Image: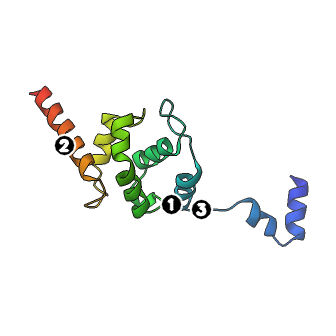
């Protein structure tokens, strides 16, 4: 610690600038969107599972970009319906479908149809 402090004093504080960088939540999530594969226990260790966790946990304004989220959802939804990854649960789909911060067109048509069908099934089961 003493070495770090004396070096910081000698180089005018530049060490701190390279050692610690403050990022906004959006900047941090953008980095995670591109690189991270970790997610919730049981969800797998892929970029998709990590991105699913980011979307589940954070508002759209804290995501890498609206365009990236839209592209990811549109490009992959059909594949997820076929392969059914561990995180692609009815609960996850319901949560994504109820997002008030998602603009029109964020979800692909097959997602809207699937989420609506599941909602109708839940309602029928409750009746």
Which residue is more in the foreground, 47 or 23?
Answer: 47
Residue that appears at 35% across and 36% down? 82
CA gap, disc 1 to disc 2? 30 Å
Mark 1–mark 3 contact, CB under 8 Å? no
Mark 1–mark 2 contact, CB under 8 Å? no
CA gap, disc 3 to disc 2? 38 Å
Residue that appears at 50% across and 44% down? 50
The image's mark for residue 35 is: none
Image quadrant assignment for residue 38:
top right
Tell me the quadrant of the picture where the C terminus can be found. Answer: top left
Residue 6 is situated, as x and y percent measured from the top left of the image, at 90, 62
Say whether residue 1 is left or right of residue 44: right
Which residue is more in the foreground, 56 or 115?
Answer: 115
- Which of pointers 1 and 2 indicates the residue nearer the eye? 2
The image's mark for residue 116 is: 2
Say whether residue 20 is left or right of residue 96: right
The residue to which callout 1 is attached is 26
The residue to which callout 3 is attached is 23
N-terminal label among 1 and 2: 1
Crowding at dot 3, Cα within 10 Å, few <14 / some 14-19 / many 20+, comes out as: few
């Amino acid at each position: 610690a003493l070495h770090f402090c004396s070096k910081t004093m000698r180089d005018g504080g530049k060490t701190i600038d390279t050692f610690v960088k403050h990022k906004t939540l959006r900047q941090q999530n953008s980095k995670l969107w591109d690189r991270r594969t970790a997610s919730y226990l049981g969800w797998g260790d892929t970029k998709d599972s990590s991105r699913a966790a980011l979307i589940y946990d954070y508002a759209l304004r804290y995501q890498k970009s609206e365009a990236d989220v839209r592209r990811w959802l549109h490009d992959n939804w059909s594949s997820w319906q076929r392969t059914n990854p561990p995180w692609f649960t009815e609960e996850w789909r319901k949560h994504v479908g109820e997002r008030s911060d998602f603009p029109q067109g964020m979800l692909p048509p097959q997602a809207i149809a699937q989420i609506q069908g599941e909602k109708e099934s839940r309602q029928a089961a409750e009746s």
